[in-house]
RNA sequence: GCCUGGGUAGCUUAGCGGUAAAGCGCGUCCUUGGUAAGGACGAGAGCCCGGGUUCGAAUCCCGGCCUAGGCUCCA
């Protein structure tokens, strides 16, 4: 750009209502706000900017200079982004408090996050017990309501200030490489290198709390040194903070590891790290899921197969998986009789061999194999987490071998069934489209077609999805279905992937109409993902309150006293004849105590029977939502129960 | 794998150099009960594993295993 253009030019700023205004190049966000209205100017906390119609929004300080045409949103304390700004300031409040107590502490970076903020620090040895004292110091800083002032300093000054802080120096060297000056935020004489934005004063951070302390690599790189990361959160008011903390406490109650123990569903003993042991109650849930998925696989035209866990390592060599896994140490493999054997880390190679075992005509395709395939992966020890991240897992796996012209329809059919499944559980999933990465194999046109096919299917179904650029596996693009756990962490469960790798590497073919050999495409899909992860997600989703069809114990009979044991047995036998999982509580305890136990065990229905019911031939029904009805006709109840189970209703609704 | 916590009865936890505690659960007995905890008694613990320090270790130190939260990874 020539000098004259630079001087004369104005830029166009587009506002959220679609209107546009021209301002001198170099105007700040604050200038524009004042231009719109003095009131707005005074209220401006930050701006959100991005190039017109393009990409992600950046949150910037009011002092940020606009040098190109932009879209701009003014952020005030009424904006959704305000909390993010406030939390950034809270991170500064933390850092100041920390350095008051530990002057030797060195600061690295301290950004806001979705739920709060963190600050990475070093040079101090603190643990969770120290957080309270730091919080008290933070409260003091907030209480004092110091103004935050933005100060521009030269890079030389900044280097001097951070003489003994290599992290800040690295930021100055890299992020601020081309800048003549850099901004600091100063509060109460304490300062931090920072681009902002921030709220006007520390008092605007109404309430802050430190949550936990952990560690993180500098810049997230494994080879770098490990820093102490302190997580915290902040809100405008104590009330908002308390509400958030309450939600966190509720989330902890949903933890599948805790509920799994309470309901005696599963264990992961020390002798089998990452390998789930299903207890009888947990196995009931898994078996119900298996039967459900078998039905869905049949609907989709899959033929069930079974392939072994133990194979020679050479099985995975031609596909390229062996090298990938072996390098990462992710495969369980060992030498036996001078041969290398391994536990399968995935099922596709075995299924491909079943396909390749005979010649197939184009008329036979799609050919689909499903398997509840147990695989083992040597996940890093620090990654293991209950049922959600394990080393031994059983996938509800399936591979469809299709002609290229069948690809799109096959994906669409699968996606329809997947939606139906997640609706059955009332489970919200996030659809992610993962596209071609650097490690991709196969031609550009194939990737393009496959990605388009996945996209078309998603759009045909009207599904919202996120695109994750470059995240796909090396062998093809995929749709990932992510569920959130109680703590808001995302876990991939179901998946639909297009795979060019296997057919090519294993030279899979079908004979076409033209009597020539053609290459099929493989679709790899898992509807639930793995039973382990899915059961874990379900436990948290339902907080252990499973729908009737999944509940390990569906009905519990509570005889009031010994005189009604026989009647209870009679009713129980009748329910068992209908295929229900029933127990009779013959413990020597009061009815109140039995009810308490029934609720603790999250049994959907309790039937209280005593002399009254025995004489009248009725039942007293109580559900886990504490609703009750007396004088219930057993026929009516059983009929309802069958319908509730067979229709897979989510909640007990006899007492609605 | 890395960092920081943690591992005591089936579960949840207290104890933190001097003979190992509580609540729930479990067993026996009393009680025969009516919609979220009736009472009494009792059983139940190589205090994660190995080494060390000490007259003496659940407790302090070193190593390992497992685990929690992050980080990294997730074919």
Image (tube, coloured by chain):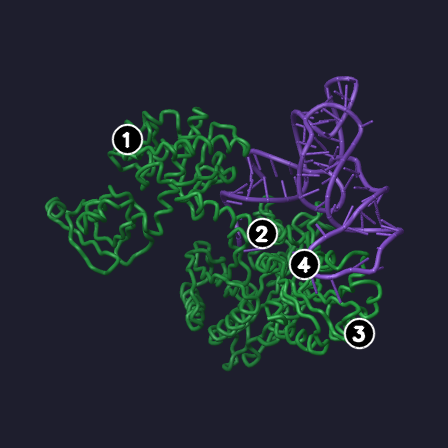
Q: Which residue is mark 1?
A: A155
Question: Which of A576 and A291 lies nearest the eye of the viewer?
Answer: A576
**Viewer-nearest of labels 1 and 4?**
4
Could you tell me which residue is drawn at 12 percent across and 48 percent down? Answer: A5
Label 3 and label 1 in one chain: yes
Looking at marks 2 and 1 on the same chain, the residue that comes earlier in the sequence is marked by 1
Please tell me if label 2 and label 4 are on a single chain. Answer: yes
Give the distance between the C-alpha atoms of the residues marked 1 and 4, in whole angstroms.
65 Å
Judge if badges 3 and 2 mark residues of a common chain: yes
Which label is found at residue A325?
A: 2
Which element carries disc 1, helix, strand or loop?
A: helix
Residue named by callout 3: A615
Mark 3 or mark 4: which is in front? Answer: 3
* Chain holding disc 4: A
Task: Please provide percent x and percent y for residue A544.
Answer: 63, 58
Chain that is green in the image: A
Residue A599 tag number? 4
Q: Which quadrant would the C terminus of chain A be assigned to in this image?
A: bottom right
Circles 2 and 1 on the same subunit? yes
Quick check: marks 2 and 4 in contact, CB under 8 Å? no
In the figure, residue A287 lies in which quadrant? Answer: bottom right
Marks 3 and 4, how far apart in space?
A: 27 Å
Chain B painted colour: purple
Q: Nearer the viewer, mark 2 or mark 4?
A: 4
Of the residues under marks 2 and 4, which one precedes in the sequence?
A: 2
Secondary structure state at the residue bearing disc 4:
helix
Chain of the residue under label 3:
A
């Amino acid at each position: 750009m020539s000098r004259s253009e630079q001087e004369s030019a104005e830029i166009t700023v587009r506002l959220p209502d679609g209107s546009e205004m021209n301002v001198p190049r170099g105007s700040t966000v604050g200038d524009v706000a004042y231009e719109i209205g003095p009131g707005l100017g005074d209220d401006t906390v930050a701006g959100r900017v991005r190039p017109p119609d393009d990409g992600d929004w950046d949150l910037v300080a009011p002092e940020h200079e606009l040098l190109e045409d932009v879209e701009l949103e003014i952020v005030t304390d009424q904006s959704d982004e305000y909390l993010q700004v406030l939390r950034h300031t809270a991170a500064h409040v933390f850092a100041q408090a920390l350095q008051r107590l530990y002057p030797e502490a060195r600061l690295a970076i301290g950004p806001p996050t979705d739920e709060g903020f963190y600050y990475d620090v070093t040079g101090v040895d603190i643990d969770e017990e120290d957080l309270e004292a730091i919080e008290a110091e933070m409260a003091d800083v907030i209480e004092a309501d110091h103004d935050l002032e933005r100060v521009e300093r030269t890079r030389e000054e900044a280097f001097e200030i951070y003489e003994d802080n290599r992290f800040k120096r690295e930021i100055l060297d890299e992020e601020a490489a081309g800048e003549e000056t850099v901004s600091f935020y100063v509060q109460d004489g304490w300062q931090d290198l920072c681009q902002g934005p921030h709220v006007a004063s520390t008092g605007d951070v109404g309430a802050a709390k430190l949550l936990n302390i952990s560690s993180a690599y500098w810049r997230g790189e494994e080879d770098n040194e490990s820093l102490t990361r302190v997580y915290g959160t902040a809100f405008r008011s104590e009330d908002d903070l308390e509400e958030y903390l309450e939600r966190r406490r509720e989330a902890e109650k949903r933890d599948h590891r805790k509920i799994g123990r309470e309901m005696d569903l599963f264990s992961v003993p020390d002798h089998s790290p990452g390998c789930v042991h299903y207890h009888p109650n947990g196995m009931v849930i898994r078996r119900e899921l298996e039967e459900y998925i078998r039905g869905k696989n049949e609907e989709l035209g899959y033929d069930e197969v079974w392939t072994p866990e133990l194979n020679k390592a050479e099985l995975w060599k031609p596909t390229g998986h062996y090298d990938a896994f072996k390098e990462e140490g992710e495969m369980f493999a060992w030498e036996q009789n001078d041969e290398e054997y391994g536990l399968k880390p995935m099922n596709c190679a075995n299924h491909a061999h079943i396909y390749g075992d005979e010649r197939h005509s184009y008329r036979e395709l799609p050919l689909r194999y499903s398997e509840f395939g147990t695989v083992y992966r040597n996940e890093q020890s620090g990654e293991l987490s209950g049922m959600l991240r394990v080393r031994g897992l059983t996938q509800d796996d399936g591979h469809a071998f299709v002609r290229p012209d069948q690809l799109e329809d096959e994906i669409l059919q699968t996606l329809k069934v997947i939606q139906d499944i997640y609706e059955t559980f009332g489970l919200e999933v996030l659809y992610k489209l993962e596209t071609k990465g650097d490690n991709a194999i196969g031609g550009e046109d194939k990737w393009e077609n496959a990605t388009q096919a996945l996209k078309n299917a998603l759009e045909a179904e009207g599904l919202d999805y996120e695109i994750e650029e470059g995240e796909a596996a090396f062998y093809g693009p995929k749709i990932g279905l992510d569920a959130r756990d109680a703590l808001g962490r995302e876990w991939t469960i179901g998946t639909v992937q297009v795979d060019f790798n296997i057919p090519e590497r294993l030279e899979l073919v079908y004979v076409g109409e033209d009597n020539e050999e053609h290459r099929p495409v493989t679709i790899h899909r898992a509807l639930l993902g793995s039973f382990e992860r899915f059961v874990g997600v379900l436990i948290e989703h339902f907080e252990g309150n499973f729908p009737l069809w999944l509940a390990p114990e569906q009905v519990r009979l509570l005889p009031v006293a010994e005189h009604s044991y026989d009647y209870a047995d009679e009713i129980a036998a009748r329910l068992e004849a209908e295929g229900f999982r029933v127990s009779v509580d013959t413990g020597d305890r009061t009815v109140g105590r039995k009810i308490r136990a029934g609720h603790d065990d999250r049994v959907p229905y309790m039937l209280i029977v005593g002399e009254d019911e025995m004489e009248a031939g009725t039942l007293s029904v109580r559900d886990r939502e504490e609703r009750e009805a007396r004088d219930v006709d057993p026929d009516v109840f059983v009929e309802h129960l069958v319908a509730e189970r067979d229709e897979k209703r989510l909640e007990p609704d006899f007492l609605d």
